[in-house]
Amino acid sequence: MGGGGSALRVCADHRGGINWLSLSPDGQRLLTGSEDGTARLWSTADGQCCALLQGHESYVTFCQLEDEAAFTCSADCTIRKWDVLTGQCLQVFRGHTSIVNRILVANNQLFSSSYDRTARAWSVDKGQVAREFRGHRNCVLTLAYSAPQDLPGAPCTEEAVARGLLVTGSTDGTAKVWQVASGCCHQTLRGHTGAVLCLVLATPGHTAFTGSTDATVRAWDILSGQQLRVFQEHQGSVICLELVNRHVYSGSADRTVKCWLADTGERVRTFAAHRHSVSALKYHAGTLFTGSGDARARAFDAQSGALRRVFRGHAFIINCIQVHGQVLYTASHDGALRLWDVRGLPRAPPPRPAAPKRSLSRLFSNKVGCAAAAPLQPA
């Protein structure tokens, strides 16, 4: 078991749990969204809070940080855009009629999902709804976007993918693929028997991976709607997914992370040691970092599965993690943002040489009753 890690800094400015943590593309800032109804901007250079974003009338559910603007969504049914230098609210996006669960900024478009059973596309500059995506029978939890250039050789018409495809996951047990240009439902991905909690897209390409309360991960062709593979070894809900180098990592309520070959569905590794649900995943430079309901973060060697280090200090579930440079950032329901030094993580020992293989033909060539008496010899 890896040794413990102590925090470089503890940022406890929020007065409620932190629901999400976002890192800017340039790596200079962090954004946290909290149960206290505020968001905060932090400098990755020194860990100092550089702006307090106030204005939401209820808790912040999710946030995304771009280089020049910050975006937050809330249980107050709105989305807000903020100036990252001044902390000033630049735009309020109104239209949803219930909690906004997720937002995604891509290709100068803003997408959102909500408990009102819809997803929406907005004009980032004008704050107006450009498209509504209606069809789910229950709340829309998660979403992902595939740009036109990420859909090579799409057999559908050029007009259908002219502005890309939006994929949404819902508690109705389905994922849906939407044509952003028209707002039409392109495909409905049916197969899960529980809520779709998380999804990731393989880009470039047109494969989606979804995780569900039915304890499975499923792979789909988002153009044809075909279910490609089912990954089924978890014993609890699949809460989070990470796709790296054609490997799918799935974090589950069964207290494990599993690594799968994306192209075949073969399970190649299981990461244990968690004492509660795995709530967050992040792969970085050969290390898999996890956050858990046991209030601890962990670092595993991604190749061997060996536990390198345990990060203790939070009091409640870790909701989100980010890594930048040699620093791990963890955000928790205890309201704290913690910074950890990840330099010097112990390397996993090289794997032991494989034992000599035994020939199956020799294994079963012994007569019944003699197999236990005669020790097997290497073939």
Image: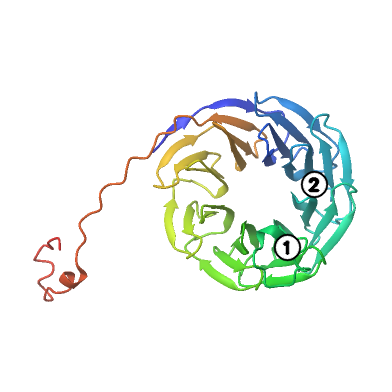
Report helix, strand or loop for mark 2: strand
Residue 212 appears in view: no
Residue 94 coordinates in the image, percent (x, y): 89, 51
Residue topped by disc 1: 165
Tell me whether the residue at label 2 lies in contact with that at label 1, contact meaning CB atoms closer than 8 angstroms: no
Instruction: Tell me if 40 is positioned left or right of 235 in this view.
Output: right
Amino acid type at image mark 1: Leu
- Relative to 303, say whether 359 is above or below: below
Residue 6 appears in view: yes
Look at 78% across and 43% down and name the residue there.
72
Distance between the alpha carbons at the discs numbered 2 and 1: 24 Å
Viewer-nearest residue: 113 or 247: 247
* Residue 74 - label: 2
The image quadrant that residue 360 belongs to is bottom left
Look at 41% across and 47% down and name the residue there.
305
Viewer-nearest residue: 260 or 78: 260
